[in-house]
Image (spheres, rainbow, N blue to C red):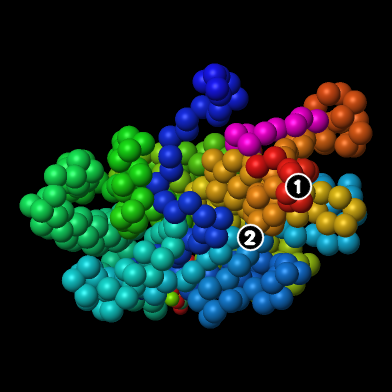
Amino acid sequence: MPPKAAKKDAAPAERPILGRFSSHLKIGIVGLPNVGKSTFFNIVTKLAIPAENFPFCTIEPNEARVNVPDERFDWLCQLYKPKSEVSAYLEITDIAGLIRGAHAGEGLGNAFLSHIRAVDGIFHVLRAFEDPEITHIDDTVDPVRDLETIGEELRLKDIEFVEKRVEDLDKQMKRSNDKQLKIEHELCQRVLAHLNDGKDIRLGDWKAADVEILNTFQLLTAKPVVYLVSDLLYCKCLFLSCWKLLFDVYDLSFVKSESTIRVQEHGGETILPFSCAFEQKLVDMPEDEAAKYCAENQITRQVCLHCYTCMIPKIIKTGFSAIHLIYFFTAGPDEVKCWQIRRQTKAPQAAGAIHTDFERGFICAEVMKFEDLKELGSESAVKAAGKYRQEGKTYVVQDGDIIFFKFNVSGGGKK
Ligand SMILES: Nc1nc2c(ncn2[C@@H]2O[C@H](COP(=O)(O)OP(=O)(O)O)[C@@H](O)[C@H]2O)c(=O)[nH]1
Ligand SMILES: [Mg+2]
């Protein structure tokens, strides 16, 4: 047989992502005690509309699934008026407070750390609100110090894990010449140097081969983090990205005068300001009352609607994409549904999210871009415009694709 021609349609090799490859990913709420974690959790849970398929939003007292708001989904539901509507969801766990010394078992430390190990990303709640009634474990309010306290605990736990791995590798290398052991040993040394330097794993520059090994460790500092600063508006302790966000998105230029920028090294990580107390108040009120409250308290529309109350949907969306989840749609008169998958998932595996038969008997994916459908108005118009595409096995599904899978499991079908 002549050698097969090199595959032309192979997707370009993307850099692998740190973390578990699964579509069942969760995010955990982490922070010191009394920073507002449970308050945030409760607000989020209250705001979430329980989806049809999850009659109870709260799975466990400290676990909830909340819908991911999406205008594209709403638009599709308007178009198809389906019998069933299923949006994407984010699974959130409220993890009990972590304190200094947790890595050494302080305050049930190891149990908390194992809860963090079980999630795929972190909402790190930082307290910026002053309230004499609510004690702070370190007496004063200082979100930057708190951020460093938690970061340090997670790094120490990772160091402990990697040191233990090195010990094991040392033993194994005495008995075997396996090249892979040496490669892993060498990576462990680089990982330890990185951590001992006070740097988190997720912020390192790792090669594809490194990531493959790192993913077998599931280190705590490898998990993506979204910082949530509670009550930033009253905060004297400033975060560069927060201010940038406030200026750029919310145009709250009055906060500018306070800019003492203390945290600059959190390169590119998302920091979202919000107010637990404020959101809580509004969540507890009926909508018309909330509007009245805002008017009476001279809370301008800008602050209220565009900054605070809008933060929860933004927080949910940000958390969802931080843990590398995306979704594609299936859409028709019976059902409009978001199917969540991890970024970098190829078409057959995405089909497998619907049914294993779809993956086993995968033939092709017929894909419409949401933007094309929206612009052209109907499936047939998209087809007529030549924008309805057939994609094969190597197609990497993109967020917002509207897909119809063709499959055949009756034997003779393509594999
Ligand atoms: N003033 C003020 N109090 C808050 C805020 N967020 C939470 N709290 C209060 O702080 C206390 C601790 O909150 P909680 O959510 O239980 O903290 P957790 O230990 O991090 O889960 C509660 O009494 C909350 O009502 C806030 O933004 N402002
Ligand atoms: Mg709590």
Which quadrant of the render holds ligand 1?
bottom left
- Using the image as rendered, state which of residue 268 and residue 213 is in the foreground: 213
The reply to whether callout 2 and callout 1 are in contact (CB within 8 Å) is: no
Q: Where is residue 137 in the image (x, y as percent from the top left)?
A: 28, 73
For marks 2 and 1, give the one nearer the viewer: 1
- Amino acid at the residue labelled 1: Asn
Is residue 341 one of those drawn in magenta?
no
Give SS at disc 2: strand
Tell me if 95 is positioned left or right of 167 in this view: right
The CB of the residue at mark 1 lies under 8 Å from ligand 2: no
Q: Would you say the magenta stretch is mainly helix, strand or loop?
A: loop
- Using the image as rendered, state which of residue 76 and residue 403 is in the foreground: 403
- Dot 2 or dot 1: first in sequence order is 2
**Segment tinted magenta in the rendering:** 388-397
Label 1 sits on residue: 408
- Amino acid at the residue labelled 2: Tyr
Screen quadrant of the C terminus: top right
The disc label shown at residue 89, or none: 2
CA gap, disc 2 to disc 1? Answer: 30 Å
The CB of the residue at mark 2 lies under 8 Å from ligand 2: no
Mark 2 Cα-neighbour bin, 10 Å: few <14, some 14–19, many ≥20: many
Q: Position of residue 409 (x, y in %)?
A: 73, 51
Quarter location, residue 96: bottom left
Whether residue 264 is visible here, answered yes or no, is no
Residue drawn 69% across the image and 54% down it:
357
